[in-house]
Amino acid sequence: MKPFAYERAATVEDAIALAADGGVYLAGGTNLVDHLRLGVREADRLVDISRLPLAEVREREDGGLVIGAGVRNSDLAAHPLVRTRYPFVTQALVAGASGQLRNMATTGGNLLQRTRCVYFQDLTTPCNKREPGTGCSAVEGLGRHNALIGASDDCVAVHPSDLCVPLAALDAEVVVAGRSGERRIAFADLHRLPGDRPDLDTTLEPGELVLAVELPPLPMATRSRYRKVRERASYAFALVSVAAALDVEDGVVRDVRLALGGVSHKPHRALVAEAALRGEPATEVAYRSAIEAELEAARPGRDNAFKVPLVRNTVVDTLARLAEGSAA
């Protein structure tokens, strides 16, 4: 590990100033420290933001929630307003990592997780995300976890976060601060597809600090579900995952929110499937038709074609279970 300086920020303004000229923010460190040890990332200065007043979950007047970037995953998962109003957020958090890691990992850190592609973490192999211009080993290499949608010739990696999948379905907003002040970013605009710059995971400007995530009021999210398909029962990243909320009245889909994980370089909002379902009968035939329309954009490779039926079947089963709950 390359030596680095360590500074503890007392205020948000202090943190932003300390992060100038290449400083890196340190909160829980569950992703960053791994990469520093592996040599995937280097830093001249770590700016510890763990003591900043960003660890509160606050209710908005409209019924939405403001979640501080420093809220630990375990605390957020257990929060009563999250559990009752947005159960798929709690389910996603509990499905991620281990209890020990959830006690350390933060909301902001979850947004900024980097891919777990094996080639990204292997310094002996070419990787455009780690070293732009060197090539993408995953294109012709082990591709079981590769993206189905939105990949490019330069990168086929997927986004690893569980939490980000329901946040995409919710149309959350992210509040950030930098040298130019505060700004708000629609969650759909936070993460990038790889294009020819896969080394850039997000649209954050250098030195910008995530302050909070805001969840809008969404009554139907009380009937929501997060499903994660993985290779072992615990502490594994998703092959595919589904975050869904469903509003059914008189056997007809009034509204639906649907997002997918493990299929793209960013959390994938299934807008095509949502549009196809609204106003349609709440049947497995309709669910299957809608997700098949969404998956027309899929471009599977040699090793990950199994993900297409896996996504389809998981979505259909998740929506069917939600509809049964709505009818009850």
Image (cartoon, rainbow, N blue to C red):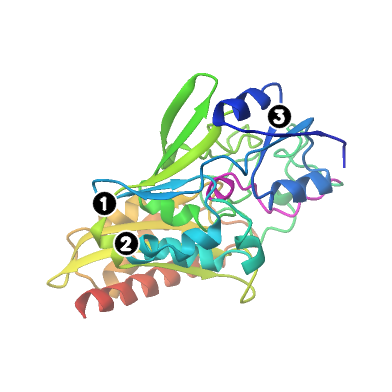
From this viewpoint, is residue 101 visible?
A: yes
**Left or right position of 211 against 198:** left
> Number of callouts in the render?
3
Question: Mark 1: few, some, or many residues within 10 Å (few <14, many ≥20)?
Answer: some
Q: Which residue is mark 1?
A: 63
* Residue 221: image location, x then y, percent: 30, 61
Q: Are marks 1 and 2 in contact (CB under 8 Å)?
A: yes
**Which circle marks residue 23 in the picture?**
3
Mark earlier in primary sequence (2, 3): 3
Asked whether the residues under the numbered discs 3 and 1 touch, taking CB atoms below 8 Å apart as contact, a structural biologist would say: no
Quarter-of-image position of residue 128: top right
Extent of the magenta region: 107-123
Nearer to the camera, 206 or 306? 206
Q: Quadrant of the N terminus?
A: top right
Q: Secondary structure at mark 2?
A: helix
**Position in image of residue 328 (x %, y %):** 21, 80
Could you tell me which residue is drawn at 46 percent across and 51 percent down? 268
Q: Magenta span has 114?
A: yes
Q: For numbered disc 3, what is the local secondary structure?
A: loop
Q: Mark 2 highlights which residue?
A: 85
Q: Amino acid at mark 2?
A: Arg
* Residue 222 x, y percent position in the rendering: 29, 65
Residue 243 lies left or right of residue 284; in this view the side is: right
The dominant secondary structure in magenta is loop
Q: Secondary structure at mark 1?
A: loop
Residue 46 relative to residue 175: left or right = right
The amino acid marked with disc number 1 is Gly
Looking at marks 1 and 2 on the same chain, the residue that comes earlier in the sequence is marked by: 1
Who comes first in sequence, dot 3 or dot 1? 3
**Amino acid type, residue under disc 3 in the picture:** Gly
Name the residue at 30% across, 68% down. 223
Q: CA distance from mark 2 to mark 3?
A: 37 Å
